[in-house]
Amino acid sequence: MNTKNITDMTTGSPAKHILKFALPLLVGNLFQQLYNMVDSVVVGNFVGKNALAAVGSCGSMNFLFFSLSSGLAIGIGIIVAQYFGAKDEKNVRSTIANSFYVLVTASLAVSILGILAAPGLLRLLATPGNIIGDSTVYMRTTCIGIVAIALYNGIAAILRALGDSRTPLYFLIVSSIVNVILDLTFVLVCGMGVFGVALATIIAQAVSAVTCLIYAYHKVPYFRLSKEELKPHPAIIAKSFRLGVPLALQNSMIAISCMVLQGVVNTFGDTVMAAYTITNRIEQIVQQPFGSLGAALTTYAGQNIGANKIERVKKGFAQCTLIALVFSIALIPVAYLFGQNIVGIFVREQDVIGIGYRALRITSLCYFGLGMIYVPRSLLNGCGDTGFSMINGFTEVACRILYSQIFIRIPVLGYWSIWITTGATWVTTALVCVARYFQGKWKLKSIVKHPVTAEEEARKAETEPADA
């Protein structure tokens, strides 16, 4: 039995564990960004701009549908991490067994809903009539793959909860390569158009889910379950939904708030829209190290709160804050000295480059705020305080809507109000996250029950009536 990739983060250097864990996640995230770009290049160049528009028009809806499975997967991973940290192997195995019931049931329901509701939802988004046919085909086909996405996300989340962030990376790379090869085959050789692109995606997702499951069964002892362990456990199923649904709702709310801000951007015309699109792409890259650091901290915090090592959780928070600060400061001169060249990679029009460059200089000053959304939020999630995710999601929605409406009415700001809104949203949301961390309620959120000290009992009595 191969358990060499399983890592106990309850001992040793927090920073070493977190950085070692985060690196494969970062590589995987960047690789996924790359293959998504290749996907768009294939569609745009070999099917046509209408096909590319059809695929793009499904982006926000697909994100909303996929958010449920990813949120549930993260919730399951948090439960596994806490039980693993507590050395409770029985409940680790029980959680893994029941995760399949949770993920398959929820993803099937979402898949059916997406297939049935696709035309209506696309019309609601004012999808142009000349592409709504292709959009419907693409959306319905990709919805079939939601079950595969849910299974892969679930297995990957469990492996990461056990301290293994490398194995999911390998299967993500395999899936990405399969997707690109099938894209080219179905589009160039078979002439299947948008349907071929969608079919390539769901086949690649199924490959990653099946191969990851086979690996886990053969190499990770916790996945070899007896008939008794495979029986449904209502309490664990309930915990999975209690921790996972708020995370899914948070992602959904953030997506909606970004759509609202996009509406403001569109009022300034195509030049500003192009500049905003470019800065968004750059920010997605910038967010990958923060996101990877946060995912590592979630596992670290989950294992240590499960082991009742509160001081190690605090130490992990302090060290991750320092890492985020150093990275954020290092990016500021990059934006100021090389921002024009970076924006120029995407377009040649000087007016777009000029706006994009100045916009990067604005948002780069707020990168630490962006990092401090990920660090405390990820720690809180790992400790089981996922209910705060909904509060956090509401904060981002409120800030993007409120700030955009305030700043746009200040004449001197003009279209710069878009990027000022982005920066202000990051900083405000970060302050709310940090305030939640210092409230200390996360210390009482572990699903693993430990002997309670008199001090903890007093704290619980004080915080329980106002707990979110």
Image (cartoon, grey):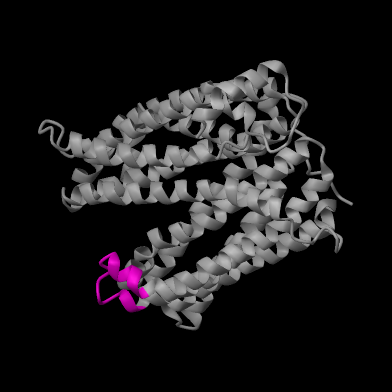
Q: Relative to 38, does residue 353 appear above or below in the rendering? A: above
Q: Is residue 28 visible?
A: no
**Residue located at (61% from left, 65% from top):** 105
Relative vertical location of residue 439 with respect to residue 208 in this rendering, above or below: above
User: Is 349 situated left or right of 341 in this image?
Assistant: left
**Residue 417 falls in which quadrant of the image?**
top left
Q: Is residue 17 left or right of residue 137?
A: right
View extreme (bottom): residue: 190
Please indicate whether residue 390 sits to the left or right of residue 422 in the image.
right
Of residues 13 and 89, which is closer to you in this image?
Answer: 89
Q: Is residue 440 above or below residue 89?
A: above
Residue 158: percent from the left, percent from the top? Answer: 70, 49
The percent coordinates of residue 135 (x first, y second) are 36, 73
Q: Write the residue at 41% across / 77% down.
A: 137
The residue that appears at 66% across and 21% down in the rendered structure is 457
Figure quadrant of residue 79: top right
Magenta-span inclusion, residue 130: yes
Q: Position of residue 390 (x, y in %)?
A: 46, 42
Q: Most extreme residue toward the left, as rendered? A: 411
Over which residues does the magenta segment extend? 119-133
